[in-house]
Amino acid sequence: MRGPVLYGCGNPPTRERLLPPVGIAAGVAVRSWSRGLTRNIVLLAVASLLTDVSSEILVPLLPLFLLTLPDLPPGFGYLVIGVIESIAESLVSFLKMVSGLVSDRLGRRKRLVAAGYGLSTAMKSLLPWAASWLHVLGVRIGDRVGKGVRDPPRDALIAESTPPETVGKAFGFHRAMDTTGAVLGPILVLILFPVLSSTRGSDQAFRDLFLMAVIPAFVAFLVVLAVKEVRAAPRRTLRLRLGLRALPIRLRLFVIVAGLYALANFTLLIPIIVVRDAAVAAGFSPEAAQTLAIFEYVLFNIVYALLAVRAGTLSDRIGRKPVILAGYAAFVGGSLGFATVGTPFALMLCFLAYGIAYAFVEGTQRALVADLAPGDLRATSLGTYHAAVGVGKLPASILAGALATVVAPWAAFLTGAAIASMAAALFVGTFAEAKR
């Protein structure tokens, strides 16, 4: 047996001998960073990244594309956009409740996730041939139906594929990858749209980019097929309920808060148009104004991506409540800025505030639902949460579009700030005694 090592006067225990080798320290750091990020978490995050590359190629182009369609009534751009986004986004939230219930009843997640990604890909492939705003509405509805089918079982897969103490980190990592795709998509638009417009014309440039967006969506569908099923105990007796009686009291209260906040959080297509109009009023050409609007939207997504994982990890450490409240406050600040600031470059700060709000709220709210939900009702709870969000989103963009059309855009943003403040106050009151 090897005996103890004795150090003489000429051989002191130097600092270098007491520290672990650099390779070991680096390995420990890597393991610490990746703790909780299992194979399923990474695959689902990659699929979301690719899907958002596809979706975010479409989002910044849709407002300008809609304005070129011959059947769009003059002066009703804000209202039409509000109608399209409200119907599409609220429908997806209602479907999430049904999808979550079906997932819990079957005890299976992967099949529904794959079906949702496949349907969204198929519907996006129809957009390049849209000739009416009603066609755009139909494509958006079909795309959002796919999202509604996949999201609750996917979120349940995320929660069940990582240890409980790293759920917030897993959701934050997923949101960060998702938003990284949302950064890459508009960047591709910034690079390719001017080139395609100059060579093929603006109308064909829209359609070329819409067709290009189908490619990452299809690859995302293939990635989902490699996800490993995490089987849960089937709950055959579960039935669809419109009430909240099956959920714990604090989860019921939070579902109401989330629905109220969703009413304030209308589509980002309206801020994009506001930036473009402000740039045109400041003397920019229409093409430069659209480019600036897309650029500020890219900055929004960069902030979102950079802060999403940190926000999730922070919520694991200090609790969900302070992180969510910080996000609500950032949203109120950004909305007030859009209502009062008129210069296009100053509006950039408002978009950055929205990026903070989305990073702190989106993933953390889902993690809080996963915390409060019973283990055998996790997907159902997430589906109910999404349904409440759908109730809020149904009138949100329609109300904002109507206010922007009839009064002015500032009225829509002031209304959003007021409603978000009410949601924050209700959240503070109902969770005043809640522990992490």
Image (cartoon, rainbow, N blue to C red):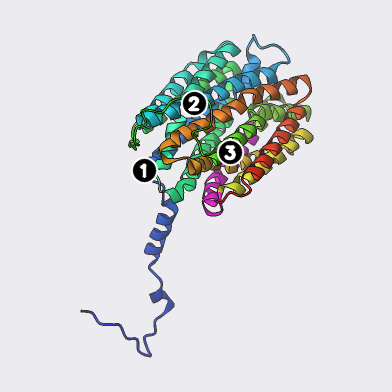
Whole-angstrom CA distance, mark 3 to mark 1, is 31 Å
Whole-angstrom CA distance, mark 1 to mark 2, is 34 Å
Identify the residue under disc 2: 241
Between 376 and 277, the one nearer to me in the picture: 376
Question: Is 243 displayed left or right of 346 in the figure?
Answer: left
Q: Earlier in the sequence, mark 3 or mark 1?
A: 1
- Residue drawn where x is 75% and y is 29% of the image: 278
- Residue drawn where x is 43% and y is 34% of the image: 154
| Residue stretch in magenta | 294-319
Q: Using the rendered image of the protein, determine whether residue 50 is visible from the camera's viewpoint.
A: no
Q: Amino acid at mark 2?
A: Arg
Q: Amino acid at mark 3?
A: Phe
Question: Is 324 displayed left or right of 245 in the figure?
Answer: right
Between 349 and 354, the one nearer to me in the picture: 354
Secondary structure of the residue carrying tag 1 is helix
- Residue 254 is tagged as 3
Secondary structure of the residue carrying tag 3 is helix
Q: What is the count of numbered marks? A: 3
